[in-house]
Image (cartoon, rainbow, N blue to C red):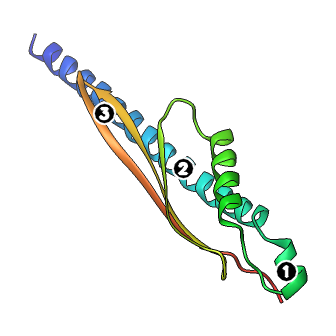
C-alpha cells in the first residue's frame, strides 16, 4: 500500500513537470517568433520606405515615415500568429538618418494544474538603416 502511494506521487509530479515544460516552451517559442518577425519586418519595411527621389536628387538616404509605418503593419500582420493580440508602438521614426524605435507586446496564457497564468511578452527594437557607400 505504501509503495503504491509513492508511485502515484512520482507519476503526478512527473505529469506536472511535463506541463511546466510545455508551458515555458510555448512562451519561449512565442518570444523567439516575435523577435525574429520584428527584426525581419523592420528591415524590409525600412528598405521599402527609402525615398528614391531624394536619393537621386540630393544623394541623401532618407525614409518616408508614413510609408514605413504602412509597410511595417502590413508585413507584420501577414506573418503574425492569429491566435494572439499584438500591440505595436512606434516611439521614434527619424527620416534622416533612417532610424526607428518600436515595441511589440503580446500576451501568452497558460493553464497548469487548474491555475491560469498570464505572461506579457514585450520585444523592443532600435534599428538604423546602414547602406554601403
Quadrant assignment for the N terminus: top left
Q: Earlier in the sequence, mark 1 or mark 2?
A: 2
Residue 60 image point, x, y percent: 79, 85
Q: Height in image: 1 above or below 23? A: above
Q: How crowded is mark 3: few (under 14 residues within 10 Å), some or many (20 or more)?
A: few
Residue 89 image point, x, y percent: 48, 56
Q: Name the residue under label 3.
A: 17
Q: Mark 2 points at which residue?
A: 34
Q: Which of 44 and 29 is in front in this view?
A: 44
Q: Nearer the viewer, residue 124 or 20?
A: 124
Q: Residues within 10 Å of mark 1 (few under 14, many from 20)?
A: few
Q: Distance from label 3 to label 2 (Cα)?
A: 26 Å
From the image, state whether disc 3 or disc 2 is nearer to you.
2
Residue in the picture at 30% in, 33% down: 17
Residue at the far top: name it.
1
Q: Height in image: 20 above or below 132? A: above
From the viewer's perspective, is 89 left or right of 40? left
From the image, state whether disc 1 or disc 3 is nearer to you.
1
**Which dot marks residue 55?**
1
- Label 3 sits on a secondary structure element that is helix
Q: Which of marks 1 and 3 is nearer the N terminus?
A: 3
Residue 40 image point, x, y percent: 67, 58
Q: Distance from label 1 to label 2 (Cα)?
A: 32 Å
Q: Height in image: 38 above or below 75? A: below
From the viewer's perspective, is 50 left or right of 128? right
Q: Distance from label 1 to label 3 (Cα)?
A: 58 Å
Q: Are marks 1 and 2 in contact (CB under 8 Å)?
A: no
Amino acid at each position: 500500500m505504501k509503495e503504491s502511494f509513492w508511485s502515484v506521487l512520482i507519476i503526478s509530479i512527473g505529469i506536472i513537470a511535463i506541463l511546466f515544460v510545455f508551458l515555458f516552451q510555448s512562451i519561449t517559442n512565442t518570444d523567439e517568433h516575435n523577435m525574429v518577425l520584428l527584426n525581419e519586418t523592420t528591415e524590409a519595411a525600412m528598405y521599402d520606405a527609402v525615398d528614391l527621389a531624394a536619393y537621386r536628387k540630393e544623394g541623401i538616404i532618407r525614409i518616408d515615415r508614413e510609408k514605413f509605418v504602412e509597410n511595417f503593419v502590413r508585413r507584420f500582420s501577414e506573418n503574425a500568429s492569429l491566435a494572439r493580440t499584438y500591440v505595436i508602438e512606434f516611439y521614434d521614426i527619424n527620416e534622416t538618418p533612417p532610424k526607428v524605435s518600436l515595441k511589440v507586446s503580446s500576451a501568452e496564457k497558460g493553464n497548469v494544474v487548474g491555475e491560469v497564468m498570464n505572461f506579457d511578452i514585450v520585444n523592443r527594437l532600435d534599428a538604423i538603416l546602414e547602406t554601403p557607400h
